[in-house]
Amino acid sequence: MIKSPAFLLLAAVLALSALPISAQQPAPSAPAPVAAAEAPATAAPAKPDAAAGGAKFAAVCVACHGEGGNSGTPANPKLAQQHPDYIVKQLQEFKAGKRQSPIMQGFAAQLTDQDMKNIAAYVGTQKAKPGFAKDKELVLLGEKIFRGGIQGRDVPACAGCHGPSGAGIPAQYPRLSGQHADYAASQLVAFRDGTRKNSPQMSQIAAKLNDREIRAVADYVAGLR
Ligand code: HEC
Ligand code: HEC
């Protein structure tokens, strides 16, 4: 064992510099979020009121989206545990006609910005009930696309944005895990056909998927947890 003063000094410097670095480094979580959007501190809007949101939800939305946003109807999306920013974006875009739905545009039109934030805060804190994949034949194809995309056809891995378990990334990418396969597939078709045009990113991706691939990946997503 060398114990020269120079060695001790070097060891001390190394120990000192190693400590804060390892303490600073967050556990590597895949995928790395692209600079999480900072909430601008300019205007001071009222804080979301989840209790008020819950009351509004129970009065109007529960009929289709289910208790706590756990819809039991395959055509009606589950909203439980969805990221609030994503919910608010969708409601604003329904209201503005940027996302079209004969059903939702009417309901969203009756909501103020504050209602939207309140409801989003409420559903965001509800626990999503797990779903399951149904099609054993297709689910492997779905898993392949979700995790690795489609080589040679420029389809990126869904997991790259929506996360390996479909949990999404708050403020950027919606949660998909446990979503009804019918609903997820209908949205992929709508992105592909241009009926849903509120996300150029998703339109580009869906444009490259055929019906079978859409069914497969939607089924896989339904079983993610
Ligand atoms: C009559 C049934 C019905 C009612 C009531 C209803 N919704 Fe919906 N909602 C739907 C359907 C169907 C869709 C899917 C629309 C589409 O295909 O794009 C949807 C979509 C949504 C979405 C988009 C979800 C996503 O994952 O992109 C949000 C958010 C939403 N609804 C919130 C609400 C809120 C808040 C209320 C109450 C104010 C409400 N809904 C009332 C049927 C309903
Ligand atoms: C580059 C990032 C990115 C990739 C890769 C990606 N998505 Fe998305 N996806 C998004 C964004 C952003 C949205 C939200 C769009 C919006 O704001 O309306 C979205 C929305 C969706 C929705 C609608 C969710 C809802 O509740 O209505 C589905 C379904 C979906 N993506 C499936 C997929 C599938 C399947 C793949 C892989 C084939 C995939 N995505 C790959 C970014 C991505």
Image: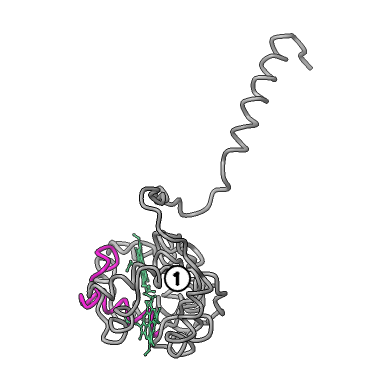
Q: Type of residue at label 1? A: Ala
Residue 201 covered by magenta stretch: yes
- Residue at (32%, 78%) from the top-left corner? 108
Residue 21 covered by magenta stretch: no
Residue 134 in percent (x, y) is at: 49, 86
Task: Respond yes or no on whether mark 1 lies under 8 Å from ligand 1.
Answer: yes
Please tell me whether residue 179 is drawn above or below residue 154 in the rendered image: below
**Quadrant of the rendering where the N terminus is positioned:** top right
Q: How many labels sit on residues?
A: 1
Q: Sort mark 1 into few (<14), some (14-19) or many (20+) by Cα contacts within 10 Å.
A: many
SS category of the residue bearing label 1: helix
Residue 121 in percent (x, y) is at: 48, 68
- Residue at (50%, 72%) from the top-left corner? 122
**Bounds of the magenta segment:** 182-202
Magenta segment main secondary structure: helix
Name the residue carrying label 1: 120
- Image quarter for ligand 2 equals bottom left
Q: Nearer the viewer, residue 107 or 210?
A: 107
